[in-house]
Image: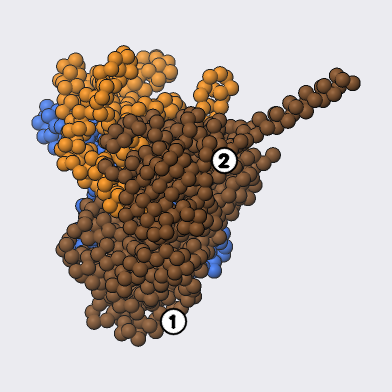
Chain colours: A blue, B brown, C orange
Amino acid sequence: MTDASTHQLKTNPRSKWLDVWREFRNHKGAVAGAIIFFGIVLLVLVGPFLWPFEPNSIDIRNRNQGPSLLHPLGTDQLGRDTMARIMTGGRTSISVGLAAMLLSLSLGTAIGILSGYFKKLDGILMRFTDLFLSLPLLPLLLVMMLLFREPLSGTFGPEKGMFILIVVSIGVTSWMPTARIVRGDVLAIKEREFILAARSIGGTDAKIIFRHILPNVFSPIMVSATLGIANAIITESALSFLGLGFPPDFPTWGRLLNDAVEFIQLHPERVFWPGLAISLTVLSINYLGDGLRDALDPRIRGR
Amino acid sequence: MKMKSLMLGVVSTLAFTSALHAERGSDGNVGIIYWQAPSILNPYLSGGTKDIESSSLVIEALGGYDPTGAMYARLAAEIPTVANGGISEDLTSITWKLKPGVLWSDGTPFTSADVVFTADYCIGEPGCYQEAKFEGVKSIDAVDDLTVKITFEKPMPNPYGPFVGSQTPILQKAQFQNCTGTKRQECTAENFGPIGTGAFVVTDFKPNDVIQMKANENYREAGKPRFATLVFKGGGDAAGAGRAVMETGEYDHAWNLQLAPEVIKQMAEGGKGKPVSGFSTAVERLEMNMTNPSADLDADTRSTRKAPHPFLTDIAVRKALSMAIDRVLLTEIGYGVAGRPTCNLVPGPDVYASDNTECLTQDIEGAKALLEGAGWVAGADGVRSKDGVRLSILYQTSTNAVRQDYQALIKEWWSQIGVETELRNLNASVFFGGDPGSPDTFQKFYADVEMYTNLFDGTDPQAYLSAYRCGNEPSPANNWAGENINRFCDPAYDALLDELASTSEINKRGEIGRKLNDMLTKDSYTIVPLTWRGRVSAISNTLGGFELNTWDSELWNAADWYRIK
Amino acid sequence: MLKYLVRRLLISVPTLLIISIVIFLLLNLAPNDPMAQVPLTIPPEVKEKMREALGLGQPLYVQYAKWLVQFMWVEPQVYLDHVLGTTMSEGQQRIFSWQTRSPVMDIIVQRLPQTLWVVGMAYVVGVLIALPIGIYSAYKQYSVFDQVGTFVTMIGYSVPPFFSGVFVIILFSVQLGWFPSVYDTLHEVVDWETFKFQLRQMIMPVMVLALQVTAQISRFMRSSMLDNLNQDYVRTARAKGLSEWTVVAVHVVRNSMIPVVTVIALNLPSIFGGAIITEQVFKVNGIGQQLIIAIYANDLPTVQTITFMFAVLIVVFSLIADILYGILDRRIRYD
């Protein structure tokens, strides 16, 4: 007879989140993505304080210069330093991108789950989604600008007001694909045995949604998140192009890209840098998301 | 021997006749690309420049303006003047004699009945876009088949409104006679394919896309047009159009390339085409708001004459704002050779151009001294104020890369003299639209300073200067449809305007015009002109006969174009 | 399922009606003025008169009712006239565009072939490329193929069409001279030569559009496949001795199709009015270009009509997607 069965466990019970972190750490792509993403965030947060040039300081004598020691990324047609503009612009682009993506993701996931899970809500919520899908974007944005720009400016100040308005505009007009995709997945998952099991042991709807359904629709949500950030950044540039975005002295990445397209043959680097910034951000979030999904998926963890 | 000479004779006859016949339609196809696509080929039902210019290939007016701004006769035999008896001594009537033997493209003769019909088509209910050209007309009569007499209600010093310039071409009565009044819109076939006297005939029209034309067999000049077919493509943007002519050679003419000067230069290095530029009357300017646009005022008072502006009513401030601007630099960066710095609202024709060049030198120190002297003292944050009023300006314009560059530069200069600026750029459709429900239109002027370009048709600025009459300002009473954007009011100005309306001698008119221009610019700085904008278009190196005309349609002499071999 | 289908079809009628009213109100609430693009040289009184002539003075409900009657009653009659040779619609007013003063439906019909050719083809190409990429990327997760695929599709999605379109033109038209930079809308395909030219002028816009589509679809395909490849039934199937091909291509793919079907179904209506920027850059006379020009010119009848047709397609494709869910995954029940 051994004492093994009566032995106390010496090690602590494994925490779920520690497991997730360990799995994440092992995922090389995710770690690389995380490093790059946080690196970019650090650069745009801290960089403008350390960099000698202001993004809006005009220096006519040095206009249209290529990369040099003084201006590593060159200057634009008014002599403004491109590096400074990319860093400052990054603050706006990333914050708008993240905020708008989070808003649209939350709206889309909420509506998708409610619609997929509760049959009674499905009809009306999906028709509501159809309505939003059919609305022409430009007039909708014009109406929102018209109605909300001055009140928001008055309450929060011109810059914060504009930020809120743009984030809400983008968020409110891009949640629909996420809602439909999440709903599709929820419809499928809802019929699986483990949900039936959870219900039969008396699980409330809320518990079932949060503990069982939400983790299993994580994949499409993560994909939507990645695509959503890219979409938000590009939409913000389209908004400035149409005159509905930030004031012209706010250098966002999308705006920098837009302004540079005209000069693509003369100064291709002006297109390259904002394009690279946007692509790197999107790619790093993509790998981050991949890693998160793999780490959170109980079937992959520990394999 | 006989055979040889016979053969020679046949060959030379053939060569001779083929040389003659080789003229019309011998040069193949010509391609034109406009980055705004024509929607309709009837300028009376549309005000758009693209529609006026594309239809000018097909339908023509009695007279037009050549590249120097002088008038020339097109369908008329000559331009009527007082000297040749065409205009009556008392200036109340003008008689046009039509060129004999002109045929419509379907072979029927062009007569004065068509001219009278066209006037009736436009005037009266429900109105037409070019009505303003017929202002003051009492009656138009066909004296005989080749003579038309236009009678005005009062003496008109400038009677060349109707039928001079591509805005008012002649329509064929036989084609359009069932298309008058409310039926006008339904005549789609006629509106898309008007029968004209011009060098080309429409064979296919896809609205907002492309027009396909062929040479008019009944054109009045033998051997013209040299091109057998013409393709007029519209759409896309200026960069694509410039590329299509100068870099890939797919088209022969691109209109109005609003691009940065270095971009145009770089495209020209493609070797297939070259840019051409010319100037008319377009001036990019800053408008100062004489009224208060503050959001704290109620909708009836805001930006109306009931509430004068807190600081822009001080001429020292306006003058200082103008002095701080380096127009030479602005123009060089924004337009290159396609622009000239200017201080005048009316930059041309020469007789109306005041010699006003003081503002071309930037004077930051002078501006600062002027403001100090007027009591505007800088606070701790560098922004000047007086009696609690801060010099804080909201400066708006439409979305356009060059305009945004101007805004950035001007904001910088104004901050150097102690003025704080907030920039705003608005969607062009909204800014220039007159929707009374939108706060962002240039008529509502809910800002302190706004910037855009305006110009006038033809060579006479009377209507243009009359915009600034007292009482002509946009306000809630007239649904914000007024032309006195600054809300400027000066009885002396109005008196001079009345004098201009009754003066006919050109030099006297020039003198009054110059005085009016000065009153708005260097005497009061209500309007701060920045750049006299020319037009840059591109033509292929193999297109001959093209002469850029900024006073009329750019396609005014398409009949004379040919292929350089 | 049949009951569900009938119920959905019935519901779609009031849905579409409400959508059309919301669109109409939105368009009229937004700052709009059909005279916005008319030059400043035309005095304001004349512009006001022209607005009256367009019918803007009438109350909103009258304008809406007119449009509705014209769209639902007059236009179908015109179509039947065209097909059957009757004259039912003679003398009745059709929906007129404010810009061209010609019937809106005529222009849409004129542009439909081009739209289907270029934009439709791009979607087909995009889907055909995206599915295999997504499937194989998931199957060989983290392989070189996967990494490269991810990289290329992500760059493709982050780069907006106003840039990629211009870049492609500069590379292939200006520098290499392979393809024309301006789409020739008058070109007719009558023989092999003209067909080759049509292909040459279509390649660039199709490439640019397909890149956008491929990115979305391949990402969702991949993530959905990854979800399923780790399921127990796959292990069972392999253990049963089924060939790898059968396991992956038949079982896993089918179960992974739901998000993909959603994305494809959501994107298909975009053929009709979604490829706005690409059509502008390449000057293809598609319906997207017509829509954006009409929006800028504040040509409300055109915008209202095209947007409503777009809404009809959305509602129809939503329904098709839902039916497909039911077919792909038998566990999904709607009743």
Chain bearing tag 1 is B
Residue beneath the point at 12% across and 27% down: A200
Which of C268 and B362 lies nearest the eye of the viewer? B362
SS for tag 1? helix
Name the image quarter holding residue C9: top left
Q: Say above or below: C58 vs C260.
A: below
Name the image quarter holding residue B52: top left
Residue beneath the point at 41% across and 37% down: B114
Most extreme residue toward the right is B1
Which of A245 and A194 lies nearest the eye of the viewer? A245
Which of discs 1 and 2 lies nearer the camera? The answer is 2
Q: Is residue C192 left or right of residue C111?
A: right
Please state the horizontal and vertical placement of residue A218, each as a whole percent of the image.
Answer: 28, 37
Question: Do the residues indicated by labels 1 and 2 lie within the same chain of the protein?
Answer: yes
Most extreme residue toward the bottom is B373
User: In the rendered image, is residue B323 in sight?
Assistant: yes
Chain bearing tag 2 is B
Q: State which tag comes first along the sequence, 1 or 2.
A: 1
Residue B559 circle label:
2
SS for tag 2? helix
Count of picture labels: 2
Residue beneath the point at 70% across and 29% down: B17
Please state the horizontal and vertical placement of residue B462, each as a whole percent of the image.
Answer: 38, 62
User: Which residue is tagged 1?
Assistant: B365
Which of C238 and B349 lies nearest the eye of the viewer? B349
What amino acid is found at the position of numbered circle 2 in the picture? Ala
Please state the horizontal and vertical placement of residue C238, each as a whole percent of the image.
Answer: 38, 18
Q: Quadrant of the N terminus of chain B?
A: top right
Q: Quadrant of the C terminus of chain B?
A: top right
Q: Is residue C31 left or right of residue C175?
A: left
